[in-house]
């Protein structure tokens, strides 16, 4: 099979680009798929404003849509998404939440007759045993991968951690510069600016849990990575995150969302986050096992779906 991963997906410096690189590597090395730039048998695309003009069946990888009405031109952007989905030969949703969101907000009539699959992101779990952890100088180490952006709710993470006040504990905020708020200037919290994904792994290897409170997250690479390293995940109760985490974490009952448009993001009450942190601590230093998120399993799901699309074309 000759696969092209379109530049609107592979050139992204954020989550889609990271995942597509992992997928291409696994498909090539483990399953003999040729990753090409010309004359593909099939194309894997991300959603963008521009039409993909390539003469081959196209599979679109969809995370979600614009449901926050405070986002500029959200209706116009959703129109581009709707047309891209309707032109696709197949659709991969990153979670059931992602599919339900698209169906509810965009109402794309043709999608009901279109081939689709729900495939979570993945991580190469074979590298985990060889990762050397950072030196852990506390009993409980929590990590969070969040920028200072409202939907990622970093302040909720920080305030909840301080509210919990777990003895001999630390929180590492990865991807963030220290905020100019004195209350967060404490030895219990460490801020690490943006680093490449592979430099995060020693923190995951040493940590006891990931805290991830992003609002309406379809399928977070950070969550996939943490679960792959055996970490339980403390998360909110909406989006794809609680769906993916399942019983391998602690969902905070802080959000209500009924697949409609909304305006802005509400912070999580510190006491609720603190309670979830203590639930995690009271369970001891548990480790989880998620072979379903290994990159080989995920890549095989993509490969099977590509074959289904090609058989139908």
Image (tube, rainbow, N blue to C red):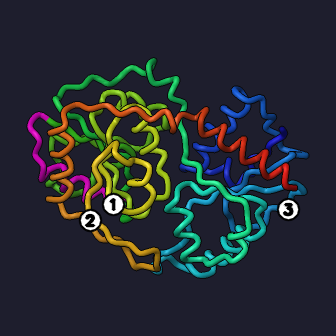
Q: Is residue 262 above or below residue 51?
A: below
Q: Within 10 Å of the Cα at label 2, are there few (<14), some (14-19), or many (20+) other Cα atoms?
A: some
What residue does disc 3 label? 53
Cβ–Cβ under 8 Å for marks 3 and 1? no
The CA span between labels 2 and 3 is 43 Å
What residue does disc 2 label? 254
Cβ–Cβ under 8 Å for marks 1 and 2? yes
Q: Nearer the viewer, residue 182 or 231?
A: 231
Residue 214 coordinates in the image, percent (x, y): 38, 58
Q: Residue at x 82, y 49 (%)?
A: 42
Residue 143 coordinates in the image, percent (x, y): 30, 41
Residue 160 painted magenta: yes
What span is colored magenta in the figure?
152-168
What residue does disc 1 label? 237
108 sits left or right of 275 in the view? right
Q: Residue at x 11, y 34 (%)?
A: 168
The CA span between labels 1 and 2 is 7 Å
Quarter location, residue 60:
bottom right
């Amino acid at each position: 099979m000759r696969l092209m991963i379109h530049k609107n997906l592979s050139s992204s410096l954020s989550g889609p680009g990271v995942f597509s690189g992992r997928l291409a590597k696994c498909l090539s090395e483990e399953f003999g798929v040729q990753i090409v730039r010309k004359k593909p048998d099939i194309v894997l695309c991300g959603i963008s404003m521009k039409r993909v003009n390539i003469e081959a069946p196209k599979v679109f990888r969809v995370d979600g849509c614009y449901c926050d009405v405070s986002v500029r031109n959200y209706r116009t952007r959703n129109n581009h998404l709707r047309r891209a989905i309707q032109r696709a030969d197949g659709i991969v949703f990153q979670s059931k939440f992602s599919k339900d969101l698209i169906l509810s907000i965009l109402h794309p009539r043709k999608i009901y007759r279109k081939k689709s699959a729900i495939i979570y992101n993945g991580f190469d779990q074979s590298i985990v045993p060889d990762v050397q952890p950072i030196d852990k100088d506390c009993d409980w180490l929590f990590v969070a991968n969040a920028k200072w952006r409202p939907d990622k709710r970093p302040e909720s993470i920080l305030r909840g951690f301080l509210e919990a006040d777990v003895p001999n504990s630390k929180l590492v905020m990865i991807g963030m510069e220290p905020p100019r708020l004195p209350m967060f200037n404490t030895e219990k919290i460490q801020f690490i600016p943006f680093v490449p994904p592979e430099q995060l792994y020693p923190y995951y290897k040493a940590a006891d849990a990931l805290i991830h409170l992003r609002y309406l997250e379809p399928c977070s690479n950070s969550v996939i990575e943490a679960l792959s390293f055996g970490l339980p995940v403390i998360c909110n109760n909406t989006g794809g995150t609680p769906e993916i985490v399942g019983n391998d974490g602690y969902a905070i009952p802080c959000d209500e969302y009924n697949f409609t448009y909304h305006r802005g993001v509400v912070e999580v009450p510190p006491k609720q986050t603190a309670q979830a942190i203590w639930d995690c601590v009271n369970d001891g230093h548990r480790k989880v096992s998620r072979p379903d998120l290994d990159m080989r399993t995920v890549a095989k799901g993509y490969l099977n779906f590509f074959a289904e699309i090609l058989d139908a074309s």
